[in-house]
Amino acid sequence: MTSTDLPVRTTAPAPRTSGHIRELRAHRSAPRGRTNLTLGDGRLTRALALGALVLLGVVWLLPMTWALLTAFKSEADASDPAHWFWPRHGFTLHGFSTVWERGDLPLWMLNSLLISAAVTVITVLVSAMAGYAFSRTRFAGRRLLFTLSVAAVLVPPQLLIVPWFRQMLTLHLLDTYAAVILPQTVAPVMVFILKKHFDSLPHELEEAARIDGAGHWRIFWSVLLPLSRPMLAAVSIFVFIGAWNNFLWPFVSTSDPALMTLPVGITSVKDAYGIQYAQTMASAVLAALPLVVVFMFFQRHIVKSVATTGLGGQ
């Protein structure tokens, strides 16, 4: 008897009942990826949540609105509390023109851009390598070094000003770009964030790369970094903003006017008649404008880094 002579037993699928069909249709029509609110999913809860968000947004925007309006006022109108919203003499660009004439804003912006970009590149690269080492390698003293890195987050940067200054003085780097850049590249919190991010990536990708003969550097550069682009973009933006707004260390480490950054430079624009609110707010607006532009270009990456991790970020 051949295999073709064997009887073939076929079983027909069990008929689906109407209840089974309704359950299947309900499962298919149910929305996927939807998360309910903590306090419920009703209309009243959503209205309360939306109202709370609107209220917080208004509270957050009020100081920024006041600063922006004050920057376009004259000094007399800026000091008049009776016309805090709409100035008596109308809006003017006098505060911006005064700041531009008394200072060297193009040079200060260029210095801030160069220093912030260099700090961002070095910090992200070093922090990513350190995060990969703590996450994917095993070496003696790894736990101790990671504990010290986490503990360094608790140290305020102001306490390190004197050690940094003595170190730069010993290395003869004061009044140079290196003196402003190098101390700002130490970012333990970014090492911690990237280490936790690398922990969330699947180990199967690393094992497959090792089978193909890839080493640590190849895995880090060609496998894990492409998967971490949203997180790296978010970290880069945070580091760039911190370096751009840093005032204390560039003010201490340099005395050459040609090396002034924007936060240091706008403080040198002073008047002999006391506080000039319009000029101060105009300087603040000019200093914050590049950051707003950077955030508007890269806000999608920040949202991705928060909402997704690993392969979901691609």
Image (cartoon, rainbow, N blue to C red):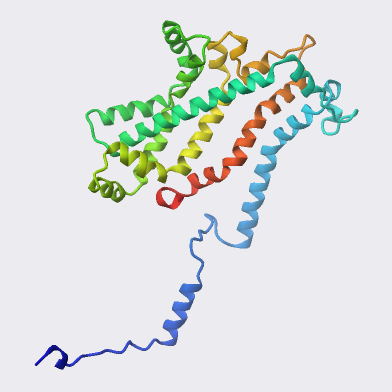
At x 66%, y 38%, the residue is 60
How many marks overall? 0
In the rendered structure, the answer to whether residue 301 lies left or right of residue 84 reads: left
In the rendered structure, the answer to whether residue 49 lies left or right of residue 29 reads: right
Which residue reaches farthest left?
A: 1
Question: x, y (%) of residue 294?
Answer: 60, 36
Question: x, y (%) of residue 303?
Answer: 53, 46
At x 30%, y 27%, the residue is 145
Question: x, y (%) of residue 44?
Answer: 63, 59
* Above or below for 123 versus 49: above
Quarter of the image for residue 272 reads top right
- Front residue of 173/13: it is 173
At x 30%, y 89%, the residue is 12
Quarter of the image for residue 244 reads top right
Quarter of the image for residue 42 reads bottom right
Which residue reaches farthest right?
A: 89
**Image quadrant in which the N terminus is located:** bottom left
Question: x, y (%) of residue 314?
Answer: 45, 51
